[in-house]
Structures are given as structure tokens and as C-alpha cells.
Amino acid sequence: MTNMRIIAPLVALAAPLLLYGGALVSQYGFGLHPCEMCYWQRWPHQAAIVLAALALILRGNDRAMRALTLLAALAIAISGAIGVFHAGVEYGFWEGLTTCSTAATGPISLDDIMAAPIIRCDVPQWTLGGISLAGFNAIFSFAAAALVLTLLRRRRTSAA
């Protein structure tokens, strides 16, 4: 097996690890608490990490590795699509959540509610050049998914 065969699943693993890791650093290192839609963008990255890791574990089975890598690329693209939706809400292009939401599970007391930071989905906590974190997630997720798909296609059509 050549090293070229595992580049696509490696990219499919590295990209969501970096994007999800960046979200965690933003949250715990810089105090940028996520809103509900921020959490939505994390779920597909978590799925992509698992799928790409499985692809690497099953690298002896080319068909399974390709299928899992393709699914990981799809999950990364889904996070990008959610990022586009979230950025659109932030820019006022369309309406987002119209009800209150919380990441807590189980019974919630009034003290829990009062202690939780209020994070609106329609107000970006940080921007760079007018692009919010949701916008950057969309850009980087779509780019990563496109790269993985290109690598998968290139490997299939190249002479072996």
C-alpha cells in the first residue's frame, strides 16, 4: 500500500480535528461560549472524526476505507452547510432559532438557567474581516470536504 492511498482519510481526519479543536480552544481558552447553532456545527465534525478514524483502521480494505472517507467528507460538508445557515442568521439574511434552547440535559433548575451565559445565535461573538466563526467554519469545512473528494477521485482515476 502506498502512502498516497491514505492521504484522503488523513485529511478527512485532520480537518475536523483542527476545526473542532479550534472551537474548543475558542470556548475554553478565550471564553467564546457557543450558541445552539455552534453546537450543531460540531456534531458533523465529531462524526467525521470517527468515520475517518475507522477508514484508517480499515485501510487494508480499500472499498471500506473509501466509503468511510467519503462519508467523513460528507459530514464535513454538512458542518459547512450548517455554518452557512448560522452565518446567514448572524448577517440577518434569514431568521434562526425563535425559541430558547440549552445544551443541558435532564431537569434544569432556575439557578442553572440564571448561571448559564446567554448566547444569541444571531450575534457573532468574534469576527475577522467581517467573517464570523460560523463563516470560517463554512469556508474551511467546504474546502476540506472538496479536498478529500478530490483526493478520493484522483486516487481512483490514477493508474495503479
Image (cartoon, rainbow, N blue to C red):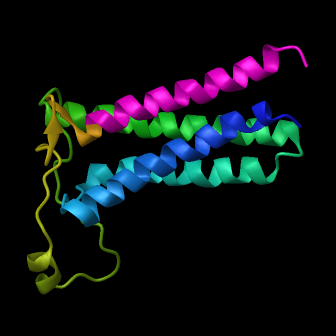
The span picked out in magenta is 135-160
- In the visual, does 74 lie left or right of 23? right
- Residue at 33% across, 53% down: 23
Q: How many marks?
A: 0
Q: Magenta part mainly helix, strand or loop?
A: helix
Image: 146 above or below 37? above
User: Percent position (x, y) of residue 142?
Assistant: 45, 28
Is residue 142 or residue 29 the one in the foreground?
29
User: Percent position (x, y) of residue 113?
Assistant: 14, 76
Is residue 142 found inside the magenta-colored segment of the image? yes
- Residue at 56% across, 26% down: 147
Quadrant position of residue 158? top right
User: Percent position (x, y) of residue 31?
Assistant: 18, 63
- Residue at 36% across, 29% down: 139
- Residue at 42% across, 46% down: 19
Is residue 159 found inside the magenta-colored segment of the image? yes
For this orientation, the residue located farthest to the front is: 3
- In the visual, does 50 lie left or right of 44? right
Quadrant position of residue 117? bottom left
Image: 49 above or below 81? below
Quadrant (top left, top right, bottom left, bottom right) of the C terminus: top right
- In the visual, does 41 lie left or right of 33? right
User: Percent position (x, y) of residue 21?
Assistant: 41, 55
Image: 31 above or below 138? below
Quadrant (top left, top right, bottom left, bottom right) of the N terminus: top right
